Amino acid sequence: ELASQICELPYDVMSSEEARLMAEGNPLSFLRVSKPEIELDPGIAPDDPAVYDRGARNFKELQNQGSLRQDASPCYYLYRQVMGNHSQIGLVAVASCQEYLDGVIQKHEFTRPDKEDDRVRHLEALSAQTGPVFLTYRRRDDMDQLVSDCVAKEPEVDFTASDGVRHSAWTISSAEQIQQIQSIFGEIPRLYIADGHHRSAAAGRVYQSMKGAGTSGHFLVVIFPDTQMQILPYNRALKDLNGLTPEQLLEKLGEVCEIEKPGKAQPDQARNLGFYMGGQWWSLKFKDEKIPANDPIGSLDVSLLQDLILSPMLGIDNPRTNKRIEFIGGIRGTVELEKRVNAGEFACAFSMYPTSIHELMEIADQDGVMPPKSTWFEPKLRDGLFSHLIEA
C-alpha cells in the first residue's frame, strides 16, 4: 500500500534539483535514499561522505518503520510495467558478480570511473543494492509460459506512477517454480546488460574487494525477454556549428547524406536521421557507399553520425567528454529538440532511429563496445520496489 509513495525513477535520469522537487512533501520517497543530497545543503559536493551517510540512514529508517520489509525466505519475483500500449514482464533475481566479471553477463558500453566510484560508495554505505540492473536474454517458450501462469493471479503490488506507467509485482515462492526457473536459466548461455552498466561494474568491484568477507557475490537484476524490450532513440544536440555557417554545414552534410527538405522530425527507418536547425527539419539518409560492410558497430546509426558528421564536420572527437554535445533521451520527443534549439541553447540537433535489441546483442556477442548513448530503454525500472542486501 506504500509502493506508490516509496518507489521512484532511477537516480540517474534526473538532476538533484528535479529530485528535490519530486520528493518534496513525501518523507517516504526513495529519492531520499538514491539521491540523498536532496536533504542536504544544495552546495554540497555530490560525493561528500555526508551524502552517502544520509542515504544509509534513510534506507535503514524505511526498514525500521516497516515501510520496507525483507521476505522471510529467498524468492523470485515478477515485475510488469505497462507504458501506453507497451507491456513487459521481467524476472527479479540476483545475478552472479563472478559471471559479470567473466563476461557471461555481457556488457556493451564503457563506464565512466567517476560514476562507478559513486555507485561503489553508495553500495558500500547501504550494504545493499537499491537499483536493479536491467538485463535481457533470448526468449524461451518454457519461461514465457511460466511467467504467463504466474501473472494470471492478482499482483501483490499494483500502482500507476505519476508519469502514467503502471507497475505490478508478484512473488514466486513455490519450490517447484523456483527450481524450474533455475533449470531454465541454467540452459541460457548468457545474459545481456540493457541498462545499468555502472551499477553492474560497482557490484563487481565491491565483490572483488570483499571476497570472503561476508558478501553474497550477487547483484540485483530484472531480466526481460528480448522480444519485450522497448528501445527509444537517444538524440543529440550541438552547442555550435564548429565555426561553419548553416549553408556550409548543409553542403558538407550533402557529401555523406541524401538530403530532403522539408524533412521528418522522427526518422522512420535505420540509416536515416532527422536534422533540425534554424526552425527547419531536414531528412538525412546516409549514402550507401558511406556505410561500412560487415561492421556491426561501424554501421550503427549512432556510429555513422559520429564518424561521418560529428567528428569530421562538427569537431566532436570524444562524445563522452566533449562539453559541446548533449544527449537527450527519446522519451522527451523531438519537440524537446525544437524547443531547445529555438531557445538558442543549441545550434542544431539530430534525431535518431532507435538501435535495435538484436544489434545490441550481436555486438555484445562479439565482445564489441557500442558508442556512448546508443540506447534509451523505456519504461525505466523503479528504484525502491526491490532491494538486495549484499551481506551474506
Image (cartoon, grey):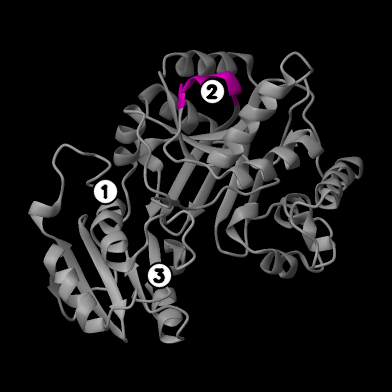
Q: Which residue occupies the foreground of this view, 254 or 139? A: 254
The residue stretch that appears in magenta? 95-105
The amino acid sitting under disc 2 is: Leu
Q: Which residue occupies the foreground of this view, 378 or 347? A: 347
- Looking at the image, is 388 positioned above or below residue 355? above
> Who's the residue at 46% across and 44% down the image?
88
**Element carrying mark 2:** helix
Q: Position of residue 325 (x, y in %)?
A: 43, 66
Q: Residues within 10 Å of mark 2 (few under 14, many from 20)?
A: some
Query: Which residue appears farthest toward the front when viewing the image?
Result: 243
- Which disc number belongs to residue 300? 1
Q: Position of residue 148 (x, y in %)?
A: 46, 33
**Element carrying mark 3:** strand
Q: Position of residue 300 (x, y in %)?
A: 26, 48
- Which disc number belongs to residue 237? 3
Asked whether, in this view, residue 57 is left or right of residue 381, the answer is right
- Looking at the image, is 119 positioned above or below residue 165? above
Number of marks present in the image shown: 3
- Which disc number belongs to residue 101? 2
Task: Give the mark nearer the N terminus: 2 vs 3.
Answer: 2
